[in-house]
């Protein structure tokens, strides 16, 4: 097969979407030495503003990376010098006037560029940011979740509009949709009206970097730099945004401090701020928890395994997840997990974690308290989590993705062996 894979999103996405795309492509190149890969970066979408050195590692003898130039549609209202009340209004008016003609030009240029660059590709896997259907190819897209549709109040208007386009593309132009969990597939079928036979489930994997660390001196060094102590904190990893339910987590933590004797482990929040994050910090302040809640923020990827390893518990009370990589990473590191009992999280965690309703603050506090006070139960969950995490790998995800490609291209000749 000649496979086109859009890597444009690697220059745009952060968090789980970046790592899902990166690790999948890396695994595809590692397991498939027979097919030909064209890794496409459509430069106008991102303009090179986000540097990603990891992308340079995506190489193999049977792959080619193409950075396609084209017409970039700039918006005057986003230009820093016009960020003043009167000038910004004028710039916005100019943008509205020019939006349609510039969009037509940008679309025309993109069509000319991509039809040429991708000529001869038999399968094209598009990303979240490049909604392109290649003529003459089987077109695949991945849907990670439907949160902008199911929880619009938790997203900005701009993000809702972007995902609305992605959902329409999946409905009308994709031949096959890959869902990252059975829960996401159910949502796609129920809310987008897509026939279930067009949706294939391929679970994400967990990277080999996430494993138990026996070097205690290294752990202490990493944690000391983040003002944390081994087994002295409860850990959350992910974007700080409303969908992650962190206001309730902070409220549950305040209740926890009344349920167990001192010293109570700190609560460490690790990850970048997203949209509407202010309420989390306001809740920390209102409850007088500034000293107890450690807002670590975004950290280098290479120290995340140490942060998981050093935590007494991992807590992830998300309202909805298309998959949920952080709980899987925590289990792979041997850290007991407390998470939500909704969406895909039961699929990922299985019987290896404690699950509660994400809207029940008291239940979350009580679940944390019970585990903090029960070392034997924590050890049981540690062992169960390691076993559960071993069921997920990027190699397996890559082989199943290749099976989706092959079956879509040759429906009468199902591929054998890739799904092992």
Image (tube, rainbow, N blue to C red):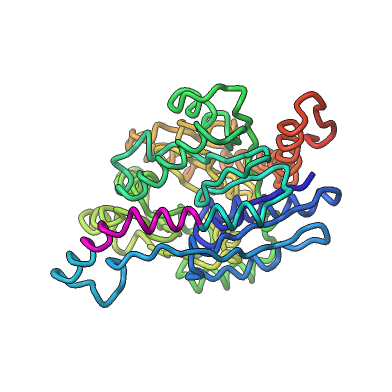
Residue at horizontal 33 percent and vertical 33 percent from the top: 360
Residue 256 can be seen, yes or no: no
In this picture, residue 55 sits left or right of residue 236: right
Hey, which quadrant is residue 397 in on the image? top right
Q: Does the stretch in magenta take in 97? A: yes
> Is 140 placed above or below 190 here?
below
Q: Quadrant of the C terminus?
A: top right
229 part of magenta stretch: no
Quadrant showing the N terminus: top right
Q: Which residue is outermost to the left?
A: 86
| Number of numbered markers | 0
> Residue 260's spot in the image, x, y percent?
37, 46
Q: Nearer the viewer, residue 5 or 178?
A: 5
Q: Is residue 306 visible?
A: yes
Query: Image point 40% across, 40% down: which residue?
Result: 164
Q: Is residue 207 left or right of residue 373?
A: right
Q: Which residues are magenta?
A: 92-108
- 237 is higher (above) or lower (below) than 155: below
Q: Position of residue 416 (x, y in %)?
A: 84, 31
Residue 300 % position (x, y): 54, 68
Q: Quadrant of residue 385?
A: top right
Q: Is residue 115 above or below residue 366?
A: below
Q: Residue furthest bottom?
A: 81
In this view, the residue in front, 79 or 290, is 79
- Prevailing SS of the magenta stretch: helix
């Amino acid at each position: 097969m000649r496979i086109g894979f859009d890597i444009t999103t690697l220059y745009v996405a952060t968090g789980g979407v970046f790592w899902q795309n990166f690790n999948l492509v890396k695994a595809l190149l590692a397991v498939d030495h027979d097919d030909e890969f064209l890794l496409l970066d459509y430069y106008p979408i991102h303009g090179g503003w986000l540097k990603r050195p990891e992308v340079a590692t995506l190489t193999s003898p049977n792959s080619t990376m193409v950075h396609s130039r084209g017409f970039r549609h700039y918006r005057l209202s986003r230009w820093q010098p016009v960020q003043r009340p009167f000038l910004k209004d004028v710039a916005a008016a100019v943008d509205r006037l020019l939006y349609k003609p510039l969009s037509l030009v940008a679309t025309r240029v993109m069509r000319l560029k991509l039809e040429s660059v991708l000529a001869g590709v038999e399968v094209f896997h598009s990303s979240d940011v490049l909604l392109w259907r290649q003529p003459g190819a089987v077109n695949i897209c991945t849907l990670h979740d439907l949160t902008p549709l199911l929880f619009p109040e938790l997203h900005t208007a701009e993000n809702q509009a972007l995902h609305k386009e992605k959902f329409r593309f999946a409905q009308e132009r994709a031949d096959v949709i890959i869902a990252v969990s059975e829960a996401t597939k159910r949502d796609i079928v129920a809310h987008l009206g897509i026939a279930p036979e067009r949706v294939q489930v391929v679970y994400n994997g967990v990277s080999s970097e996430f494993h138990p660390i026996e070097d205690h001196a290294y752990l202490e060094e990493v944690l000391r730099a983040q003002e944390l102590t081994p087994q002295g904190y409860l850990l959350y990893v992910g974007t700080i945004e409303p969908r992650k339910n962190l206001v309730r987590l902070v409220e549950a933590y305040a209740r926890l401090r009344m349920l167990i004797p001192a010293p109570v482990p700190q609560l460490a929040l690790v990850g970048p701020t997203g949209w509407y994050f202010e309420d989390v910090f306001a809740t920390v302040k209102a409850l007088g928890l500034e000293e107890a809640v450690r807002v670590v923020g975004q950290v280098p990827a290479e120290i995340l395994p140490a942060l998981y390893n050093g935590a007494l518990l991992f807590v992830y009370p998300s309202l909805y997840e298309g998959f949920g990589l952080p709980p899987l990473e925590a289990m792979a590191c041997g850290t007991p997990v407390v998470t939500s009992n909704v969406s895909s999280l039961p699929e990922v965690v299985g019987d290896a974690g404690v699950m509660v309703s994400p809207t029940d603050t008291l239940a979350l506090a009580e679940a944390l308290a019970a585990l903090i006070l029960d070392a034997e139960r924590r050890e049981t969950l540690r062992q169960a989590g390691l076993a559960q995490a071993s069921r997920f790998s990027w190699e397996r995800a890559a082989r199943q993705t290749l099976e989706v490609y092959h079956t879509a291209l040759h429906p009468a000749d199902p591929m054998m062996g890739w799904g092992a």
